[in-house]
Image (tube, rainbow, N blue to C red):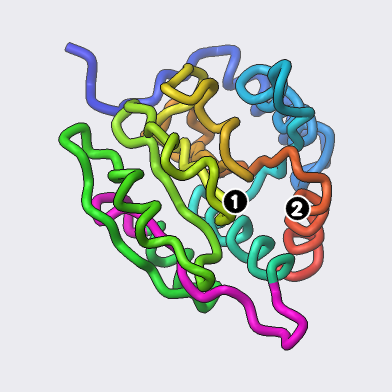
């Protein structure tokens, strides 16, 4: 029997961890930069989108938070206010709601389809001038059909913590919205114990994300 969500670790993992611990560099550095580059090249870059750039962070929740935070900063009106709502699923990890509240936005919940994913048509109906983003989790490995949302002005933030490296109804999962995130928690597809990643092909957005991580987070 395969244990549910039990990480698979071997001697290679131990040797790499040992190299890192003896390198004297435990903060962000070349190892994280290589992870960011490899992830984008393997899972996101394509002929019609890219190049994608990423930032590795401390958790999936942090990836959600800093992604919404960067969007909020860049979409601020001249008055200094920003759109105040994030449309997302009624069925998902509580980190979604925590991240929305952390940036001062209001969650707008939509019902789900039988596969557990948010109903994109209902999500599109809830998008207004107050919408900061549509946060769309691909749940249980099932890609969301984002078709009703792709023509709207609201940025799509894809939550790929349970689904990446595959194609869905709209092409490569994670590479159709304005930005994406994933988690490297112990129960996720790629596990590092803790950790996460947020990525975008918008140069202004990734610079804002990196500034927030370096100086404000």
In the foreground, 178 or 188 = 178
Q: Quadrant of the C terminus?
A: bottom right
In the foreground, 190 or 117 = 117
Q: Please give left or right for residue 36 compared with residue 173 in the image.
A: right
x and y percent of residue 122 in the render? 30, 51
Q: Quadrant of the N terminus?
A: top left
Q: Which mark is residue 205?
A: 2
Mainly helix, strand or loop, the magenta region?
loop
How far apart are the alpha carbons under marks 1 and 2? 19 Å
Residue drawn at x 35%, y 57% is 125
- For label 1, the SS is loop
Residue drawn at x 83%, y 33% is 30
Q: Which mark is residue 216?
A: none
Mark yes or no: residue 63 visible: no
Residue drawn at x 48%, y 25% is 170
Magenta highlight range: 76-94
Q: Please give left or right for residue 83 compared with residue 105 in the image.
A: right
Residue drawn at x 69%, y 67% is 75
For label 1, count other residues whose C-alpha is less than 10 Å away and answer few (under 14), some (14-19) or many (20+).
some
Q: Please give left or right for residue 204 compared with residue 201 in the image.
A: right
Question: Looking at the picture, does residue 186 appear above or below residue 77?
Answer: above
Mark yes or no: residue 213 visible: yes
x and y percent of residue 6 in the render? 32, 26
Does 86 lie within the magenta span? yes
Question: Looking at the picture, does residue 169 appear above or below residue 183?
Answer: above
| Residue beneath disc 1 | 58
């Amino acid at each position: 029997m395969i244990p549910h969500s039990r990480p698979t670790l071997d001697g290679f993992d131990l040797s790499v961890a040992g190299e890192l611990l003896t390198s004297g560099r435990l903060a962000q550095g070349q190892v994280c930069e290589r992870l960011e580059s490899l992830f984008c090249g393997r899972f996101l870059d394509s002929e019609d989108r890219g190049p994608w750039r990423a930032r590795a962070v401390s958790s999936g929740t942090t990836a959600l938070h800093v992604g919404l935070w960067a969007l909020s900063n860049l979409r601020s009106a001249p008055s200094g206010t920003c759109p105040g709502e994030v449309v997302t699923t009624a069925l998902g990890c509580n980190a979604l709601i925590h991240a929305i509240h952390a940036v001062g936005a209001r969650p707008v919940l939509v019902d789900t389809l039988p596969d557990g994913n948010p109903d994109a048509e209902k999500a599109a109906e809830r998008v207004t001038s107050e919408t900061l983003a549509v946060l769309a989790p691909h749940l249980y490995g099932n890609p969301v059909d984002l078709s009703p949302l792709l023509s709207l002005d609201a940025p799509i933030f894809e939550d790929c913590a349970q689904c990446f490296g595959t194609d869905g109804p709209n092409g490569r999962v994670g590479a159709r919205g304005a930005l994406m995130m994933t988690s490297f928690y112990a129960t996720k597809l790629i596990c590092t114990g803790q950790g996460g990643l947020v990525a975008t092909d918008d140069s202004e957005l990734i610079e804002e994300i990196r500034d927030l991580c370096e100086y404000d987070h």
